[in-house]
Image: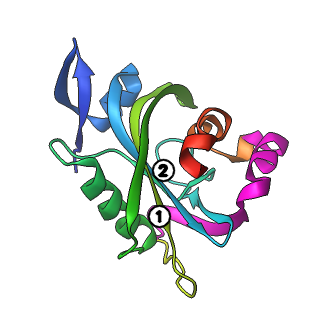
Amino acid sequence: MTIHIPTWVDGTLQPVEKLEAHQRGLRHKAISVFILRDGKVLLQRRALHKYHTPGLWANACCTHPYWEEDALTCATRRLNEELGIAGVSLEFRDTVEYRADVGGGLIEHEVVDIFVGEMPAGREPVPNPDEVMDTIWTPLDTLAEDVLRAPDTFTPWLQIYLREHAGVIFG
């Protein structure tokens, strides 16, 4: 299935195929979701067949809205598709921008709407194996140290979020 994502081309928002946007390093829309519970943050380990950053740990959900899909709808949809999480209220925190080399000649130049949700006690994610190979609840107060200790096991965007936007996301 070809997915077209909202991408700025010559200053105008246009639908561009997702892989092409990453190959060309084009600035495009994205969303990121952080799920919290009892002082911990949910991380997912990306499936090994993902076309970039396979096997790396990331926040609960990161994706791109379809052309003309709003950010909250996208975040809610993908959280359910990737982790089987539905019915969790998501709060918009901020829009941030970053540019990162994600390997294989691909560049993420993203304008990201960040959402945070609180997972009720007693509920656990049900990962879609096509998207996610593992999940873990990590203490929020040690996550930044874990990333510094083993940066090659975490996605570039999670490292950027923790380094530059932690106050907005978790504050």
Image: 121 above or below 113: below
| Residue 117: mark in rendering | 1
| Residue 141: mark in rendering | none
Distance, label 1 to label 2, CA atoms, is 25 Å
Pointers 1 and 2 in contact (C-beta within 8 Å): no
Image: 80 above or below 53: below
Relative horizontal placement of residue 89, taking residue 163 as reference (left or right):
left
Q: Residue at x 49, y 27 (%)?
A: 98
* Residue 150 x/y as whole percent: 80, 44
Relative horizontal placement of residue 17, taking residue 110 as reference (left or right):
left
The answer to which of 102 and 74 lies nearer the viewer is: 74
Could you say whether the residue bearing mark 2 is in a helix, strand or loop? loop
Q: Residue at x 61, y 42 (%)?
A: 167
Q: Residues within 10 Å of mark 1 (few under 14, many from 20)?
A: some
The amino acid type of the residue labelled 1 equals: Gly
The answer to which of 24 and 82 lies nearer the viewer is: 82
Residue 15, quarter of picture: top left
Upstream in the sequence, badge 1 or badge 2?
2
- In reply to whether residue 158 is colored magenta, the answer given is no
* Residue 136 x/y as whole percent: 66, 68
Q: Residue at x 33, y 44 (%)?
A: 64
* Residue 17 x/y as whole percent: 24, 35
In front: label 1 or label 2:
1
Image: 99 above or below 150: above
Magenta residues (range)? 128-151
The amino acid type of the residue labelled 2 equals: Lys
Relative horizontal placement of residue 54, taking residue 17 as reference (left or right):
right
Q: Which residue is mark 2?
A: 50
Q: Residue at x 22, y 46 (%)?
A: 66
Outermost residue on the bottom side: it is: 122
Image: 151 above or below 88: above
* Residue 39 x/y as whole percent: 68, 66
